[in-house]
Amino acid sequence: MIPISVLILTKNEQQDLPGCLASVAWSDDVHVYDSMSSDRTVEIAQAAGARITQRPFDNWASHQNWGLQNIAFKHPWVFYIDADERMTPELVQSVQTAVTAPGDSVAFRLERRDFFMDTWLRHVQTSSFYMRLFRPEKMRYERLVNPVSLADGPVGEIAGYLDHFPFSKGLGHWFDRHNSYSRFEAEQIVANRRRGEGFSVIKALTEKDFHERRYHQKELFYRLPLRPLVKFLLLYVVKRGFLDGRAGLRYAILQSIYEYMIVLKVEEREQQLSETSAPVLLQQP
């Protein structure tokens, strides 16, 4: 067995979990961190010999940070994976090599392949690199949704792909999930604005640390006019999503719709807060 623990986040994942578990069967310490599933997720995990931890979901950063701080992992290194993701054999070999001789790295970044309509979305992505192998005491997350991974130390890179199937449950599930994501994104944007958190255009363009650069890029992006159109052009033209064929076109459109959902929910939330904080004028008798 490879001396790495595995962490799988779940919520009603009875369809995708078996395949995920099969791809991490090399580990003797698999943890299913479940958000109170109502289907057979826990039953499937138990049958596979995984250790179960359940906690009601609040938001992404809080949930993930709690898991890293409270789950008793057997090994010093943890590989984090979602139920709709699969480790390729090449990636399994790479993570084993990485923890055998990590040097001064406390985390490792890898490349993920997203699939839609049986097509690898090779181009129509803002980024395909994610920090998934790490020392749990050296890792923390920020943001309510699409959390930023922050490692307390040097970050290396490993070869091999993590395959992701975000449409495995159909378009309806994708829309339901992104309806929830857009609410969290809107809350995050409004909260940042009210705290007066700044951003740097220079860091958005030149910062060497990937995750800090991504944070400033997001903050810059949230201030752009016509964001849904900008998102489509970024993915389909600048990132050359047209090379991914019909799947690339549809995915770019879906992402622009998601961005418009965020725009509308930010406006709605700011209007709600404005009405709440508005002074009440008493009518004179």
Image: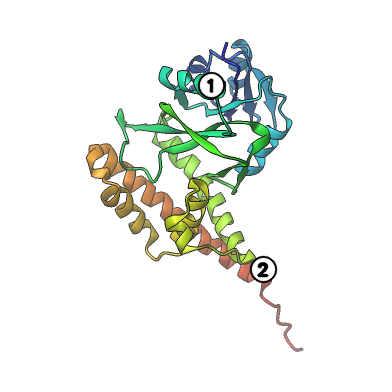
Above or below 224: residue 171: above
Q: CA distance from mark 2 to mark 1?
A: 42 Å
- Quadrant in which the N terminus is drawn: top right
Residue 185 in the image: state x and y as whole percent: 53, 52
Q: Nearer the viewer, residue 156 or 113?
A: 156
Residue at the front extreme of this rendering? 103
Residue holding disc 1: 14
Element on which disc 1 rests: loop
| Amino acid at the residue labelled 2 | Thr
Residue 136 in the image: state x and y as whole percent: 65, 32
- Quadrant in which the C terminus is drawn: bottom right
Residue holding disc 2: 276
Q: Nearer the viewer, residue 141 or 90?
A: 90
Residue 97 in the image: state x and y as whole percent: 50, 20
Going by the image, does 99 lie left or right of 257? right
Q: Residue 85's mark? A: none
Residue 221 in the image: state x and y as whole percent: 44, 59
Q: Nearer the viewer, residue 143 or 172?
A: 143
